Amino acid sequence: MSQSFSKIWVAVIAAVFIIGGILVWHYDWFPEEKTGAPEIKELKLNLKTTKLATIPIGLYAEHITFGPNGKKVAYAAEKEEKWYIILNGEEHGPYENICWGTEPTFSSDGERFAYGAKRESEYFIVLDGIEKRTYDNVYCFHFSPDGENYSYKAKRGDEIFIVLNGEEGKPYDRIWHSAFSPDGKSFVYKAKQGDNFFVVLDGKEMGPYDNILSEIPVFSSNSEKLAYAAEEEGKQFVVINGKKEKGYDNIWDITFSPDSENLAYAARKGKFSFTILNGKEGESYYENLWGLIFSPDSKRFAFKVQQKIEGELKEFAVLDGKIGEKYSTVSWLTFGPDSRKFAYRADESRIIIFDEKKSTIYDGMGMLAFSPDSNNLAYAMEENFKNFIALNGEKVRPYDFLATNLTFTSDSKYLYYGIQISNEVWWIVDKIENFK
């Protein structure tokens, strides 16, 4: 692992938070989330602001990772040309390296912990403190949503295969990312053997196809439906539970509604893009569109469009068929949990549009997060080269790096997140009423 990531106080810290995946602070680097994803079971949260770690001055450290309940923190550290994992102050190692793509990760309840490491040219996963079987390489470890199952990719010679709960699957020439169903009972991935592409669901191959466009096939929230985009003879189409839909020139952005009753995706025919909702083509045509989302009640629908207007490239949100104001960029379309409120970032992530009202102009902006009662909007922002957490337009707390999602408790009384300030790593719990 290169030292070019630099020391902890100047590094851009990669952080894993089980609810949100791998996150890196920068106002354009947080992946946009789909509203209405299945909720992970209620955590036994640490509701007290707590300093969880102090990084020794001069120590190289990467991959700060918070347990989702705020009680544990881990990071990788280099010392005397060896690598270690530090978990709540306890040192694990030494290793030659910590595997890229298998950085420290916690299960959804914070009780299980895993990472990938290298020793004597062999790679292996360390799960709950136990070193697993060695391979030529390991990649992409992840737990199921309930934390009961786990998987990763492994390489032995020219063969690449999935390891699911310790059992090796069929080898392929190439395997992409994999996913568990929301209930944790099914497992799917995209694979290639020779010139043929397959979707492999619970060990059963679907295909072959000329290509599979979906990086990861998509499960519905109730885990009963699986959809992906495939290609045959130059035409692309969506496959839902094994049934092909109509073919188009291009298909992308497959999205189920939270109630699992609706399926939307974007398609292109010739020069124009449009939405497909439950098999029906939208009536409006655009140059480019993406970012399809449903409201939590599954009754509203939004996406963003990029189009040249009077010779200038503009972006705008389309909400329930209504075109919004044009900006240089639009991102992070977000519904409030009540499905009535709607917000997004605009103009190079420098302003927030909240129910058609513009915020103050900032230097940059990160993720947006509504409270469950939809009365509060939190976000990360940058002003005069300083980073802050903001709540309802007011700066709440400065920080150097944000290492988790911004998340509210289910009663909307607290906002919690993990940050790094100088060489200290903090779990922060802000009481909302203190900022009203």
Image (spheres, grey):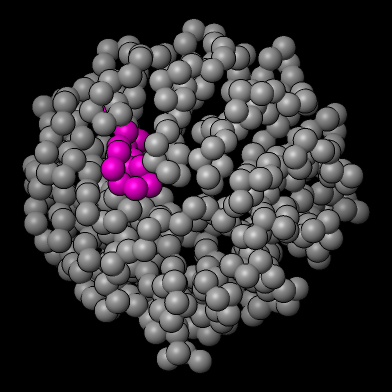
In this picture, residue 425 sits left or right of residue 133:
right
Residue 217 falls in image quadrant:
top right
Q: Residue lying farthest top?
A: 194
Residue 258 lies, with reference to residue 341, above or below; the image says above
Q: Would residue 146 be counted in the magenta stretch? A: yes
- Residue at 21%, 62% in the rendered image: 72
- Residue drawn at 81 percent across, 65 percent down: 325
113 or 227, nearer to the observer: 227
* Image x and y of residue 256, in percent: 62, 44
- Name the one closer to the observer, 256 or 390: 256
390 or 421, which is in the foreground?
390
What segment carries the magenta color?
A: 137-151
Q: Is residue 148 magenta?
A: yes
Residue 420 visible at all: no
Residue 389 coordinates in the image, percent (x, y): 45, 76
Q: Place residue 280 in its image quadrant.
A: top right
How many numbered discs sit on the rendered protein? Answer: 0
Horizontal relation, residue 175 to residue 331: left or right:
left
Specify whether 435 is left or right of 309.
Answer: left
Mark yes or no: residue 327 visible.
yes
Q: Main secondary structure of the magenta part?
A: strand
x and y percentages locating residue 99 in the rendered image: 26, 37
